[in-house]
Amino acid sequence: MTSATHLVLIPSYNPGVRLSATVRAARAHWDPVWVVVDGSTDGSAALLAELARGDPGLRVLVRERNGGKGAALLDGLRAARSAGYTHVLAMDSDGQHPAECIEEFMSASRAAPGAMILGAPVFDSSAPRIRLRGRRIANWWTNLETLWAGIADTLFGFRVYPIGPLLEVMQRTRWMRRFDFDAEAVVRLSWRGVAAHNLPAPCRYFSRAEGGVSHFHYWRDNLLLTWMYTRLFCGFLVRLPLLAARRIAR
């Protein structure tokens, strides 16, 4: 399906062998698809450039240095707004996210353009247990800091965002540039009154033998999330009267 308002935006950093299949699958379900190469050192920028040469629906943006997922998305969001787009569906480049769900999520966004359409992951046996336990903790904090505003999963990055509110939120803070992007984005958008609509989406963790790549660092990224939730909790306390009044008025 082709759209002049909604595009698929894929941040990519050394994504491994599943990159081509992921991009082709996204293109099979949507036009246009943009990929932001975030300072990759694995030759994937050249691979994507070759794919784009034969596909006018694929655009590749290249960042010279790695800045993190949020930084890559920020560049893509700015370029998308300049090109006249109003919404982006963000998805990862490593094959974990379901390209077959793109059209359903975009349709949901068109029906509720002021909302964020969030993937509620459906995990199979490939999901590491330690990641699932950490996810439950992160979800609890997000629900607390949004007064249970209906966010089913705070870390799953398969989502449709309205570009305007997300850019306003990101440009007011120096955070949200790395692994903290997904969780902080939904909290801050919820504080702005952007409703959360959840749709189920299958999630697959590939093993190394299957070409899976993970840039998650257990201690570094959990410390980053801990600092993020500490910052957000302080912001939550300041906003609590407004959030509570909004909740009562529903």
Image (cartoon, rainbow, N blue to C red):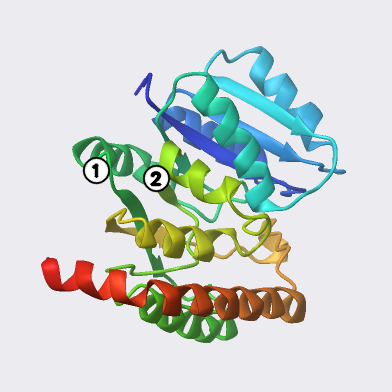
Residue at 67 percent of width and 43 percent of height? 72
Q: Is residue 145 visible?
A: yes
- How far across and how far down the image is residue 190, in percent? 36, 61
Residue assigned mark 2 = 160
Q: Amino acid at mark 1?
A: Ala
> Between residues 147 and 129, which one lies in front from this camera angle?
147
Tags 1 and 2 touching, CB below 8 Å: yes
| Viewport quadrant of the N terminus | top left
Residue at 42 percent of width and 44 percent of height? 165
Q: Secondary structure at mark 2?
A: strand
Residue assigned mark 1 = 108
> Between residues 14 and 170, which one lies in front from this camera angle?
170
**Is 235 placed above or below 214 here?**
below
Q: Is residue 92 visible?
A: no
Q: Secondary structure at mark 1?
A: helix
Image disc number at residue 141: none
- How far across and how far down the image is residue 204, in percent? 50, 62
Please identify the quarter of the rendering in which residue 192 is found.
bottom left
- How far across and how far down the image is residue 233, in percent? 50, 79
Residue at 48 percent of width and 23 percent of height? 32
Please identify the quarter of the rendering in which residue 62 is found.
top right
